[in-house]
Image (cartoon, coloured by chain):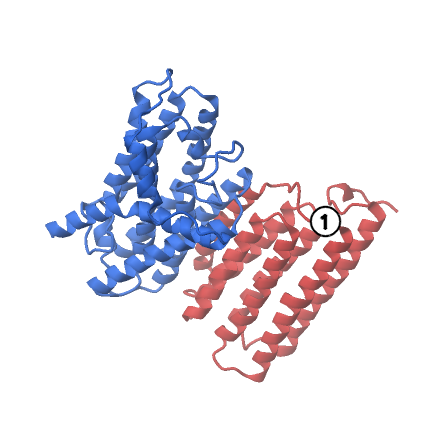
Chain colours: A blue, B red
């Protein structure tokens, strides 16, 4: 068991940048380019960690805490998600709340760091980010309610250890939940219908605005942390779908790995075929994700 | 309740939500067309034995609801040159939220209905009531006449779903008559739209509040 926990921690540390590589490769394939290498983010991070930092004179310690928490909170939260294994590295009753609020803490500190730079532009980004994530959170928590109602547990490990006998409405509720969480995943990780991780254009930037003042290792922390956040939310989504498939341990791990790869490729496809939404339309999509998980809850209540 | 029926009813409710959220006429017309096709398939999945009348009903429903009526509405839309609902009385996000609330209410309400035995546990009454609510919401909160036609269509779809409970009990001719009524209504509304547009050079319902000779 100890070995499995260490293995999961290592996967959590090593795999996420590769996922970003898969997304970018898919996008490049759609555009007919060869695209950057699959391992590009590893090179970028290595380069950034060796650089010095340019730090604005208006900043205080919060600026550094923000950058550090951007990496630390997804790492800690990721330890609670079973990465296709029968149990997570860290597991206790109620760990899904700690998971959600660790991500919330990271978001708060990133926004605080953005405000700390004193730039009104970054303040605007922080305000946008918090507005949209406050709409994403109800969908996330309604999803937790669905999972708790299906399995009668509030710990990721027990929830994802599989159902013995699926009741009547479970499959449809899980599918609705997966659709809702896919929207939340795209919004939280600033992927395309909501935000473009590649641009630094002013008008529709949400997340990218907040990190403009970071450089060198701090920027590396943020990029690495963002990759890890995407990885753990993707794992969560794949785990949720795997609930309804009754499979044994090793096949489950293979299904998990295949699911993650497919999900990353799917994100690349979504980013290639969709345009970014107008900013006024973003809340509409997030509210529909709340509706989807709310609908799943209603289905289970019957 | 088998899986296919459940799935189709859920698709129906999700289509309501997306119709409430979209501002483009063309998108809403296409959504009601898909809804019509879903209704036709529902007829097949609720009925276990495929008689000639059922298959005929299914084909007729799909032809009228998802081919002819959308085509008529498309043409009406092109002629009056309205592409999107610009200023609804109730914004898109609030009407989406209201649609969600009314769906939850429909689920609650349908448990209190005194239905005959196999029905209380089925998904048909709540799906029907929630579709009717969505149609009402669409009908009352949009200002363009063509969206009101669309709201009427969604409302009628909800009533059609409720009729599924009585499948086999309603005579074939009655069902065909209802479909024909709907078709004529939409046909007439398409023509009226055109006349309103020609007379008042707008089909905004807010402006049409006074009767004149």
Q: Position of residue A113 (x, y in %)?
A: 36, 25
Q: Position of residue A150 (x, y in %)?
A: 30, 56
> In this rendering, is residue B104 above or below B158?
above
Q: Is residue B86 left or right of residue A219?
A: right
**Residue A174 x/y as whole percent:** 36, 57
* Residue B29 image-quadrant placement: bottom right
Would you place residue A146 above or below residue A133 in this image? below
Foreground of the two, B147 or B30: B30
In the image, residue B209 sits, relative to residue B154, either above or below, namely: above
SS category of the residue bearing label 1: loop
In the displayed image of the protein, which residue is found farthest to the right? B213
Residue B164 picture location, percent across and down: 53, 70
Q: Nearer the viewer, residue B93 or A5?
A: A5
Q: Chain of mark 1?
A: B
Does residue A296 show up?
Answer: no
Q: Residue at x 52, y 50 (%)?
A: A274
- Can residue A273 be seen here? The reply is yes
> Residue lying farthest bottom?
B52
A104 vs A164, nearest the viewer: A104
């Amino acid at each position: 068991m100890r070995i499995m926990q260490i293995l999961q921690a290592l996967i959590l540390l090593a795999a996420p940048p590769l996922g970003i590589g898969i997304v970018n490769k898919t996008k490049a394939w759609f555009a007919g380019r060869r695209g950057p290498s699959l391992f590009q983010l590893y090179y970028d991070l290595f380069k950034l960690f060796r650089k010095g930092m340019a730090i604005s004179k208006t900043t205080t310690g919060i600026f550094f805490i923000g950058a550090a928490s951007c990496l630390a909170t997804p790492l800690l939260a990721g330890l609670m998600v079973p990465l296709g294994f029968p149990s997570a590295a860290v597991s206790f009753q109620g760990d899904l709340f700690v998971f959600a609020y660790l991500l919330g803490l990271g978001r708060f500190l990133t926004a605080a760091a953005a405000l700390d730079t004193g730039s009104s532009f970054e303040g605007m980004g922080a305000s946008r980010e918090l507005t949209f994530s406050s709409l994403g959170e109800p969908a996330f928590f309604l999803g937790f309610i669905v999972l708790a109602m299906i399995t009668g547990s509030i710990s990721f490990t027990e929830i994802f250890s599989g159902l013995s006998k699926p009741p009547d409405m479970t499959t449809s509720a899980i599918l609705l939940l997966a659709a809702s969480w896919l929207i939340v995943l795209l919004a939280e990780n600033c992927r395309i219908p909501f935000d473009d991780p590649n641009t630094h254009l002013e008008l529709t930037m949400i997340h990218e605005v907040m990190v403009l003042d970071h450089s060198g290792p701090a920027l590396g922390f943020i990029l690495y942390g963002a990759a890890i956040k995407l990885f753990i939310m993707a794992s969560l989504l794949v785990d949720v779908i795997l609930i309804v498939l009754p499979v044994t341990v090793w096949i489950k791990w293979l299904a998990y790995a295949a699911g993650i790869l497919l999900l990353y490729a799917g994100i690349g496809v979504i980013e290639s075929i969709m345009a970014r939404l107008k900013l006024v339309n973003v809340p509409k999509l997030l509210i529909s994700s709340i509706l989807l998980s709310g609908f799943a809850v209603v289905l289970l209540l019957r | 309740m088998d899986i296919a029926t459940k799935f189709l009813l859920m698709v129906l409710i999700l289509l309501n939500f997306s119709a409430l959220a979209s501002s483009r006429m063309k998108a809403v017309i296409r959504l009601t067309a898909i809804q019509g096709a879903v209704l036709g398939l529902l007829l097949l999945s609720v009925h276990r034995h495929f008689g000639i009348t059922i298959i005929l009903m299914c084909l007729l429903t799909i032809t009228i609801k998802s081919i002819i009526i959308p085509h008529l509405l498309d043409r009406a839309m092109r002629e009056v040159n309205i592409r999107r609902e610009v200023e609804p009385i109730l914004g898109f996000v609030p009407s989406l939220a209201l649609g969600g609330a009314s769906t939850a209410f429909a689920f609650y309400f349908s448990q209190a209905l005194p239905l005959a035995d196999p029905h209380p546990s089925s998904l048909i009454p709540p799906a029907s009531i929630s579709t009717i609510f969505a149609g009402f919401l669409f009908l009352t909160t949009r200002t363009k006449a063509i969206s009101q036609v669309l709201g009427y269509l969604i409302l009628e779809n909800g009533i059609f779903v409720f009729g599924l409970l009585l499948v086999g009990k309603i005579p074939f001719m009655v069902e065909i008559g209802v479909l024909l009524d709907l078709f004529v209504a939409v046909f007439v509304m398409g023509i009226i739209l055109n006349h309103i547009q020609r007379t008042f050079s707008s089909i905004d319902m807010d402006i049409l509040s006074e009767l004149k000779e």
